[in-house]
Amino acid sequence: MAEAILSARGLTKRFGALEASRDVSLDLRAGEIHALIGPNGAGKSTLIAQLAGSLRPDAGEVRLAGRDVSALGVAARARLGLGRTFQVSALAMEDTVLQNAILGALGARGRAPSPFGRALARGRLRDTAEAALARVGLGECAGQRAGSLSHGQRRLLEIAVALTLAPRVFVMDEPMAGLDGEAALSLRALLDGLRHEAPILLVEHDMDAVFALADRISVLVEGAIIATGTVAEIRADPAVRRAYLGEEG
Amino acid sequence: MSREGWFNLALAGLLVAFPLAAQAMDEPFLVTLATRAVILALAGVGLNLALGLGGLVSLGHAAFFGIGGYAMGILASHAQGYTPLAEWPLLIEGTKSMPVIWLVAVATSGLAALAIGALSLRTSGVYFIMITLAFGQMFFYFAISWPAYGGEDGLSIYVRNGFPGVNTLVPLPFYGLCLAVLALALMLCWQIARSPFGLALNAARQSAKRAETVGLSPYRLRLAAFTLSGAITGLAGALHADLNRFVSPAMLSWQTSGEIIVFVILGGTARLFGPVAGAGVFVALEHLLGELSDFWHIWLGLLLLAVVLFARGGVVGLVCGERRHG
């Protein structure tokens, strides 16, 4: 079995009486796409936030590449190789596509930029950014403002920015949301290829994409993982069918 | 060159030509007026770094302006009175040397900005505005109740401080000195805006979440920008005090903070020459309308209202259009 690059053990998070995460344990292994599915309100976003460091769990730990990162924030986890994309694009919309990608490459250097640093010219940052944009097919749009991109292109730019970090793992929150037809298919092909660079934890509602891409699936219901397995195992799991896939008995 | 580039060049040309023309017409008062505009522009350039690039609406920049002013006032008053600032454990004398005064002004206002920023940048939005205002007022009331340096009456010096090789007592050379400092500050800001730091700061302004997700700390970026911003505004304060040969708690008042914000908004937020245009318009209005009525601020208020409602990019935006990217 491949080693776990990102793992969660016993994550628990309460908001008052609501237990949004209940003793969640999860592994993301090298080379895999691990899909996290569950009905709305199951606690997927809360779980992702705990993995990425934007939410502190009440109990449990998160390990990234063998290191306990439970006490670290978002920026520190990103520097350790956690590349995240958002459900609602969080880009610098006034900046160009290239500038957004350079920002990722800048963060990947691991040290804070100095106000007296050299002006951005052609250099390694720019090369890394351009390579990432070319990889997702946005090379032609480098000079455009991020705010002028279509919904699908913004999704691709999110992934390109994550790519510039040369991440150890990707955590992607519904990258397919709002995409259909050609755009969804090309993004699916992109994700399929990315898994070999870094494993992907994929939160997704598009079940066709999940079944086509995922090596393993974990099903989250009411804050707890009720099943983890291959696509075939999950499809056959009666508890999953009852709780999530909407089938009776 | 872009339209904004040409505009900036024209404005720079005006900054050189106007005082020369005023001198040729034997109007030294206009040179002094231009000097005031250049110094206020420098204060605005400082704030623009935090406000324009970093999105930090500071209502406490008068504190840095005033600290710079008092750095000049305190050092010069000790020098003119031949009394040391301190005798133990080190003998610290006053000075009439502008370079030394500027260094002290930059260091003290920068340190104050670092301390104020470290606390206030833990908040955002209206809370940040209120905390910076509160810090500004703290310094204001401290200056009022500090009898050693004039208290409410302020502090006068008899003769303007000196700069090696420049006769600062004559309006035109002093103007040239202030213009050179402004030019250096503009070059620094131009460089910063094009540096990786500027890119990261600007991105953190648009989306703090984005900056964090790529491993950058918005807090550190903003603190660095706020510190530099305070230091530049402090330098402007030292020059302003030297221009008037007078420093008073009024430099630290929240109205001064408001005026520095007005320079930036009037000229164009986040535009390199925005504060220069804004301070120029402000000083011109103050002079022209001030002659007509004591209530000229009403007209300034209406102009500001028009800018905010119809010309968000300020004077620079109005002339040059929307900001270019990339």
Image: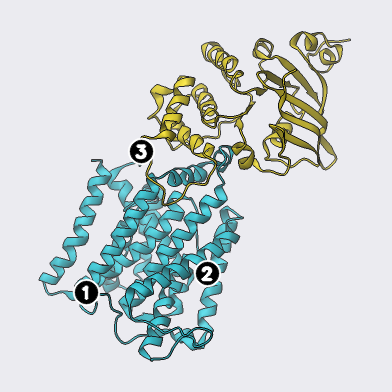
Q: Nearer the viewer, mark 2 or mark 3?
A: 3
Q: Residue at x 23, y 80 (%)?
A: B169
Chain letter belonging to callout 2: B
Compared with B249, A85 (above or below) is: above
Q: Secondary structure at mark 3?
A: loop
Mark 3 sits on what residue?
A121
Mark 2: give few (<14), some (14-19) or many (20+) Cα within 10 Å: many
Could you tell whether B159 is left or right of B312 in the image? left
Q: What separation in Å lies between label 2 and label 3 (alpha carbons)?
A: 39 Å
Q: Which residue is mark 2?
A: B136
Kind of residue at badge 2: Gly
Residue A148 visible in the displayed image: no
The reply to whether discs 2 and 3 touch (Cβ–Cβ < 8 Å) is no
Judged left or right of residue B216, residue A118 is: left
Q: Residue at x 74, y 29 (%)?
A: A7
Q: Quadrant of the N terminus of chain A?
A: top right
Where's the C terminus of chain A, which quadrant?
Answer: top right
Disc 1 on helix, strand or loop? loop
Mark 3 neighbour class, 10 Å CA radius: few under 14, some 14 to 19, many 20 or more: few
Q: Which residue is mark 1?
A: B165
Q: Chain of mark 1?
A: B
Chain B shade: cyan
List x then y, in percent, for residue B312.
39, 48
Chain A drawn colour: yellow
Q: Is residue A65 left or right of residue B256?
A: right
SS class, disc 2 = helix
